[in-house]
Image: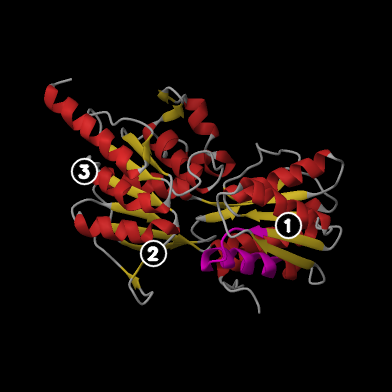
Amino acid sequence: MSPHRRIISVALCLLAASTGCKKEAPAAPSKPTIGLVLGLGGRGDHAFNDSALRGLELWAAGVKYEKAGYQEASLSERQSSLGPDLAPRAQELAPLGITPVVLQSRVAEDYEPNLQLLADQHVSMAMGVGFMLENAVEAVARRNPSLPFLLVDSPLLDAQGRVLTLPNVRTVVFREEEGCFLAGALAGLATKTGRVGMVGGMRIPLVERYEAGFRAGVAATNPNATVLVNYTGSFTDFALGKQVGQDLLLKNTDVVFAAAGVDGLGAIQAVKEAREAGKTVYVIGVDSDPSHLAPQAVLSAVVKRVDLVVYEAIREQRQGRLQGGNVSLGLKEGGVGLAPVRLDFPGKEDALRTVDALRARIISGELKVPTQPAP
């Protein structure tokens, strides 16, 4: 390494340390670099962040992250990560010849300096995943108008809360209430106690859309069922999520919808332990399919295709086609969906047919899913 390059490398490391970020992999100068700032919860959340990492690392870069750094991912590893719905598109989702640069933030105040660090490193595109990065993405994008940005799970908003656009920022939001409606419909058909629960994270409009869709779905298939909803006020507290999940189980719920980030992982653990103790209970995950965490307890999951959004944005950027603006994705566009139902329960086949019929009605526009919980 030349003295000049060594000085730059040291300066970047010092900046990374001062912002509280963790740079997970060095940029390789031979390939264009794509930067990603993770939301709180970070790598290993088995949900939103891991989905974004899958799209960036396994799919776009063709690498897997290990403690020693990035290693080339095998063809089978990449293909298995696609899941059954995207498996037919394996050739289309081939690696794009990029190098990932991933920054982990310890607190929300790290978002903006971490995004600026990516800009200072001259990445080809900078990405932020999670609604909490909205202000940081807007600020850094305005300072770096020639750098394209991707913001997932939030639009840009002005001081009055109105949606705004920047030419160098693509924002993607999901109509997650549509997937949650299907999850609620499934829960209403699977419950035997007539009581289902939801563990929410922060009580914000995004998570309230989860609740609204879930409640409406339960009511559509089991109008006499009771829906119990508890919010943890957090997305990063595993122990609290487990405690809230256990509380719902004590109240005789037998299907729990875990929609709370890392807190949701705690709720999944609570249901897993109850299942191991002999109770016939199920959990429905969110963002990514968590079946590998509790294969005997996970009934399904509301999947948000963050991985596909990230991959396709990178592909468009590499092809010179990426444009700014706002994109909304739901069932019709394949942006949300329901993970495969792998566990058996009485009446499963009829239940799946009912859920499929409801999916078709939502896609056609015949059925409108609410975005606000009923008062």
Horizontal and vertical percent for residue 343? 76, 43
Q: Which residue is mark 3?
A: 120
Q: Which residue is mark 1?
A: 353
Q: Residue furthest front?
A: 18
Give the numbered dot on residue 284: none
User: Residue drawn 79% across and 68% down?
Assistant: 226
Give the CA separation, mark 1 to mark 2.
35 Å
Mark 1 or 2, nearer chain start: 2
Residue toward you, 139 or 349: 139
Give the CA separation, mark 2 to mark 3.
24 Å
Q: Which residue is mark 2?
A: 155
Dot 3: what SS?
helix
Callouts 2 and 3 close, C-beta under 8 Å: no
Horizontal and vertical percent for residue 356? 67, 58
Amino acid tagged 1: Arg
| Overall secondary structure of the magenta section | helix
